[in-house]
Image: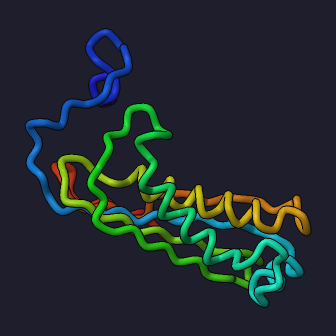
């Protein structure tokens, strides 16, 4: 378990001590998808969902999710997030919504979990907003695309 930093020498879960790490500029980008029927995608794209602006509300939910990550994931540090941006793009090829979140901080630990939480929260909000017309929607492909900063440097997903 030496490579798993959230476990101590006895295998007990613990919050990693980052107090001796230097603060550096950090960024993470994550993505995910909400697949749905073409009719549901049209409802969202036309702005005719009964609950309102699906993409606008999901964008706000994603931002809020990123800011609340340490409240949701037990061993995450609360971070001074300096930027959260979400792109929610209708994609007729899926059909569905492509979600990308970018999170930045200047801190002692990365923002990968915040970016992933932003995507997850936005995807769940899209589902909630239009579940009355399409309960068969599928949330998938949530993954980290990019992270920069810190001791481990840059990571970029393949494909």
Instruction: Choose between 46 and 94: the one closer to the eye.
Output: 46
**Residue 66, position as x, y percentages in the image:** 45, 56
Q: Quadrant of residue 89?
A: bottom right
Q: Is residue 32 above or below residue 41?
A: above
Q: Which residue of the protein is positioned furthest toward the top in this rendering?
A: 10
Identify which residue is drawn at 8% across, 37% down.
20
**Residue 55, placed above or below residue 135:** below
Q: Is residue 3 left or right of residue 145?
A: left
Image coords of residue 6 (percent x, y)? 34, 28
User: Percent from the top left, x then y, of residue 2?
Assistant: 27, 24
Tell me if residue 130 comes above or below residue 106 in the rendering. below
Determine the residue positioned at 61% across, 60% down. 141
Check the image and name the residue furthest to the front: 51
In the displayed structure, does residue 29 sit left or right of residue 38? left
Residue 83 location (% of width, % of height): 33, 68
Quarter of the image where the N terminus is located: top left
Q: Is residue 14 above or below residue 91?
A: above
Nearer the observer, 75 or 8: 75
The one nearer the camera, 107 or 140, is 107
Q: Is residue 14 left or right of residue 94?
A: left
């Amino acid at each position: 378990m030496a490579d798993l930093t959230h476990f101590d020498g006895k295998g007990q879960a613990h919050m990693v001590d980052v107090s001796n790490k230097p603060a550096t500029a950090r960024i993470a980008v994550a993505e995910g998808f909400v697949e749905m029927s073409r009719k549901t995608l049209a409802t969202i794209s036309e702005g005719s969902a009964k609950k309102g602006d699906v993409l606008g509300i999901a964008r706000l939910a994603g931002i809020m999710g990123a800011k609340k990550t340490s409240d949701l994931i037990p061993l995450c540090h609360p971070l001074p997030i300096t930027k959260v941006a979400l792109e929610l793009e209708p994609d007729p090829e899926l059909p569905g919504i492509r979600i990308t979140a970018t999170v930045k901080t200047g801190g002692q630990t990365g923002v990968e979990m915040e970016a992933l939480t932003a995507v997850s929260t936005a995807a769940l909000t899209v589902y909630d907003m239009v579940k009355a017309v399409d309960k068969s929607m599928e949330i998938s492909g949530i993954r980290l695309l990019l992270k920069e900063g810190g001791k481990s440097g840059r990571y970029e997903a393949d494909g």
